[in-house]
Image (cartoon, helix red, strand yellow):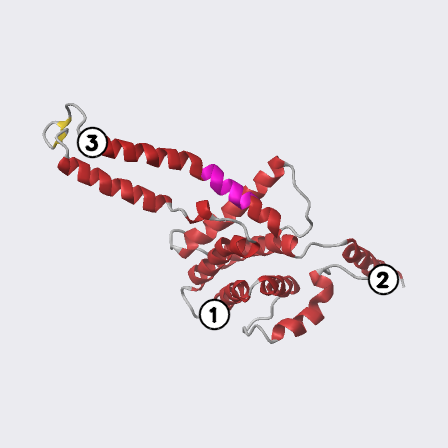
Amino acid sequence: MTRGPQNPDLQASSTTETATSTIRTSRTLTAHQLALLRALEEHSANLGAMYRGGLAVLDDTANPERFAQCAHSMRELMEKLPEFFDVPTKAQKESLKGKVREIEDAHSRVRGNTRCFSPTNGWHGDIDIHLRRYLVRLDRFFKWFTSHHPRRRDELHSALARLDGSGRALPSPLASLNVQAWDRKRDYFQSVAHHRRAANEAEFQQWLGALERFLLDRLVPRTFDDFAEIDALLEEEDKDAES
C-alpha cells in the first residue's frame, strides 16, 4: 500500500540521514525542522537555503546580529513562498512606502509650482493646472490604497490554500484567521529584521517555532497512517508500563 507523508516524529532517523548531506550547522535539528527542510527543498532549493541559512545564523551565538539576520531569512522565506506555488503576488510587491514617497514628492512640487499656495497665505484661490494634476494623482493614490489591502488579503488566502496539501477548503472566517496569523508572524520577523523590535532567545524561538509548525502542518499534512502508527506506539508504551 502506498503511504502518505509520515509524522516527522516517527521519521527522525531516516530524515536525519537524508538531510545530513544538505545542511551543516553546529546544532542538531529537531525532527520537525528536518521534515520542514526536506519539504521546502522538494519545492525549491532556494526555499531550503533560506531556511537553512536562517537556522545557521541563529545558531551562531557569537554573532550579535543573529536574531535580525535570522528574522530577515524567515521574512524572505514567507514572502517568496507564494511564487513557488504559482500564486500571483502583485499586491504583495506593491509598496505603501514607495507610493507615499511619490505623493510626498508631488506635494513638494505642487507647492512650488502652483499659484494656489504661498508660505504666507497657505492654500487659496481657484484651482490651477498644477493643483488639479496633484489632486488627480492624490485621488488615484487613495483608490489604490482602498483596494490594496483586500487584494493582498486575497493573494495570501490563495497562497495559504495552495500550501495546504490536504486540498480541503476552509470556511471563510477560518481562512481569514490563517491570513491574520500569517501576517502577525511576518510583522514580527520584519520588525526584528529592521531593528524596530528587540528580540530575546525565548521569544524569538517561540515565533520561529510557530512559523515552523504553521508551514509543516500545510506542507507535510499528517495522514491516517500517521495516526495509526502513533496509536500503535502508544499502545506498546502502555504495555511496557504495565509489565
Q: Residues within 10 Å of mark 2 (few under 14, many from 20)?
A: few
The label number, if any, that marks residue 131 in the structure image: 3
The residue at the point 80 percent across, 59 percent down is: 229
- Judged from the image, the secondary structure of the residue bearing numbered disc 2 is helix
Amino acid type indicated by mark 2: Glu
Does 88 sit left or right of 105 as displayed?
right
Circle 3 or circle 1, nearest the eye: 3
Magenta residues (range): 149-157
Q: CA distance from mark 2 to mark 3?
A: 79 Å
Image coordinates for residue 196, horizontal then vertical, percent: 38, 51
- Judged from the image, the secondary structure of the residue bearing numbered disc 3 is helix
Q: CA distance from mark 1 to mark 2?
A: 40 Å
- Judged from the image, the secondary structure of the residue bearing numbered disc 1 is loop
Amino acid type indicated by mark 3: Leu
Q: Measured along the vertical axis of the image, is residue 19 above or below residue 135?
A: below
Magenta region, mostly helix, strand or loop?
helix
Amino acid type indicated by mark 1: Asp
- Say which label, 1 or 2, has the lower sequence index: 1
Foreground of the two, 162 or 123: 162
| Residue located farthest toward the left when viewing the structure as drawn | 120
The label number, if any, that marks residue 196 in the structure image: none
Does 218 sit left or right of 68 as displayed?
right
| Residue position marked by numbered label 1 in the rendering | 60
The residue at the point 24 percent across, 34 percent down is: 134
Image coordinates for residue 81, horizontal then vertical, percent: 53, 55
Q: CA distance from mark 3 to mark 1?
A: 55 Å
The label number, if any, that marks residue 236 in the structure image: 2
